[in-house]
Image (cartoon, helix red, strand yellow):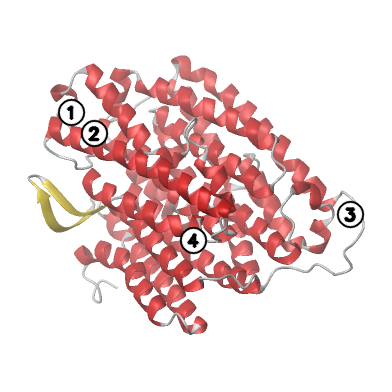
């Protein structure tokens, strides 16, 4: 790979893969087999290029791979800086795009969906935006890709073009374009104070000296509003509303690209703009932890009331995203490790759950939990995979969710003081997770179906079933081997490079 693609060009080529793929998708729009082959080829190529950068970053003691396209403003380049933390998100997005592309083929063909060329085209640009966010070298570059991600996913949310879908799309844009305005304001103010927007391990050195305490707190609030994609409450309602989208889109929103870009951005700001020492000095860790725990508990309570499976999963996502925010808010080594690790771990577990929900819709047409009595006996592979994902959401072994919660609890102990109270919040959240996930499992496997439609329900097509089996299996493998895809090593490299991370 090194001989074929010089190291400095790999970030650019990794990002360009979906953009190039989108061109061929349009060119072969009337030939589905070739069109979908280009989707698969682009996704595989992107993952291979992203993954090829892992040994370089790890072997270089965390030194990033840098590539600059042009200088936009004095001391502000439009370019990439591939570090260990960015690779975690890029690996997650690019690998899961391969599986979601396969799943989409089975889903879209089974339901004879319209506008499939537009669907695959927009999917490419959504991943273009997500991986661009992951590999951005500064806030300015991240902002550009962040907005590309917003705009490219709007047609996916509104794909069905029903009044409900169009309303969901408008609401989606209203929230996230507004968020983009706050993000841009935060970028401009950061540049005004420091003369740079670069991500610096440990935080921008002169930020604390150039801005007052009040200004720093206001700036942090702007960043939080800018990252509404993280769906923290009360700015969350766009996410359940977006469930009207096709299930592969829901999987993209909730497990891969959009929401992960939000929490990724918050972790970036905490660790690479403000830095742990400044966050401690301003008391922002406790503020962020309280915001996260409020969202965790309330989202779980909302989830309990949902009968629609995708909406229940949506509120579960809101809860899990705030777990990542909570982890970084601890400002302790294990807390930050847990936050970074939960990005890929949650991605695999949650995408499993959404793909299972889509398989049930394709095969049976059932969308509500109350209608799914006995479906586990008719779709055993799908519901076993669902059970694995649900166990992960409940932080139970043998799933990846148990590993990250272990880090969160120890992170609370490291942080000490007020933070030592928060493990009880995590316990309450886990109990609530059990309360709304286990009834689904019970209904599927043990409840008796009332009557029969006369048609036998089978498993979903292999294009859908294989990705489900892979993501469920990986969710268990992470429990026994967290360094799959070098995730654990990348997390350790990222945290060790952060100056000032201390209990």
| Residue 4 appears anywhere in the view | yes
Q: Residue at x 31, y 65 (%)?
A: 14
First of labels 4, 3 by sequence position: 4
Q: Are marks 1 and 4 in contact (CB under 8 Å)?
A: no
Dot 3, crowdedness within 10 Å: few (<14), some or many (≥20)? few
Dividing the picture into quarters, in which one does residue 307 lie? top right
Residue with the mark numbered 3: 449
Q: CA distance from mark 4 to mark 3?
A: 34 Å
Residue with the mark numbered 1: 207
Dot 2, crowdedness within 10 Å: few (<14), some or many (≥20)? many
First of labels 3, 1 by sequence position: 1
Q: Are marks 1 and 2 in contact (CB under 8 Å)?
A: yes
* Residue 67 pos. (x, y %): 18, 58
Task: Farthest residue to the top: give it.
Answer: 417
Quarter of the picture holding the C terminus: top left
Dividing the picture into quarters, in which one does residue 149 lie? bottom left
Q: Nearer the viewer, residue 415 or 326?
A: 326
Q: CA distance from mark 2 to mark 3?
A: 57 Å
First of labels 2, 4 by sequence position: 4
| Element carrying mark 4 | helix
Q: Nearer the viewer, residue 501 or 370?
A: 370
Q: Residue at x 17, y 31 (%)?
A: 205
First of labels 2, 3 by sequence position: 2
Q: CA distance from mark 1 to mark 2?
A: 8 Å
* Residue 358 pos. (x, y %): 65, 60
* Residue 358 shown left or right of residue 136 in the figure: right
Foreground mark, 3 or 1?
Answer: 3
């Amino acid at each position: 790979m090194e001989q074929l693609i010089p190291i400095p060009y790999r970030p650019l080529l990794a990002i360009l893969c979906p953009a190039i793929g989108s061109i061929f998708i349009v060119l072969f729009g009337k030939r589905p087999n070739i069109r979908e082959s280009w989707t698969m080829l682009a996704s595989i190529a992107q993952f291979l290029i992203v993954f090829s950068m892992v040994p370089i970053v790890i072997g270089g003691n965390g030194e990033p791979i840098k590539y600059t396209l042009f200088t936009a403003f004095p001391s502000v380049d439009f370019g990439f800086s591939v570090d260990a933390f960015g690779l975690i998100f890029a690996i997650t997005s690019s690998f899961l795009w391969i599986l979601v592309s396969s799943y989409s083929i089975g889903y879209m063909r089974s339901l004879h969906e319209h506008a499939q060329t537009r669907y695959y085209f927009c999917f490419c640009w959504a991943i273009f935006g997500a991986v661009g966010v992951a590999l951005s070298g500064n806030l300015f570059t991240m902002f550009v890709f962040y907005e590309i991600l917003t705009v490219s996913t709007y047609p996916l949310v509104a794909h069905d073009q029903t009044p409900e879908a169009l309303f969901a799309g408008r609401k989606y844009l209203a929230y996230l374009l507004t968020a983009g305005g706050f993000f841009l304001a935060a970028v401009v103010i950061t540049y005004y104070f420091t003369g740079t927007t670069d991500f610096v391990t440990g935080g921008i050195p002169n930020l604390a000296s150039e801005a007052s305490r009040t200004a720093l707190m206001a700036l942090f609030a702007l960043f939080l509003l800018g990252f509404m994609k993280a769906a923290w409450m009360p700015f969350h309602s766009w996410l359940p509303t977006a469930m009207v989208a096709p299930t592969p889109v829901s999987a993209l929103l909730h497990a891969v690209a959009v929401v992960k870009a939000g929490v990724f951005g918050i972790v970036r700001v905490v660790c690479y703009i403000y830095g742990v020492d400044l966050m401690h000095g301003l008391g922002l860790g406790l503020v962020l932890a309280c915001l996260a725990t409020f969202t965790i508990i309330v989202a779980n309570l909302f989830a309990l009331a949902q009968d629609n499976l995708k909406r229940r999963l949506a509120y579960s996502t809101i809860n899990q995203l705030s777990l990542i925010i909570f982890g970084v808010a601890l400002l302790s080594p294990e807390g930050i490790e847990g936050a970074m690790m939960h990005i890929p771990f949650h991605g695999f577990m949650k995408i499993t759950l959404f793909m299972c929900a889509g398989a049930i819709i394709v095969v049976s047409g059932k969308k509500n939990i109350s209608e799914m009595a006995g479906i586990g006996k008719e779709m055993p592979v799908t519901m076993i995979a669902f059970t694995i994902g649900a166990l992960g959401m409940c932080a139970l072994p043998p799933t990846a969710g148990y590993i990250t919660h272990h880090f969160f609890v120890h992170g609370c102990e490291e942080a000490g003081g007020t933070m030592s109270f928060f493990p009880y919040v995590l316990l309450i959240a886990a109990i609530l997770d059990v309360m709304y996930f286990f009834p689904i499992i019970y209904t599927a496997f043990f409840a008796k179906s009332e009557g029969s439609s006369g048609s036998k329900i089978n498993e979903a097509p292999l294009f859908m079933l294989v990705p489900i089996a892979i993501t469920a299996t990986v969710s268990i493998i992470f429990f026994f081997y967290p360094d799959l895809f070098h995730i654990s090593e990348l997390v350790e490299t990222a945290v060790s490079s952060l100056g000032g991370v201390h209990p």
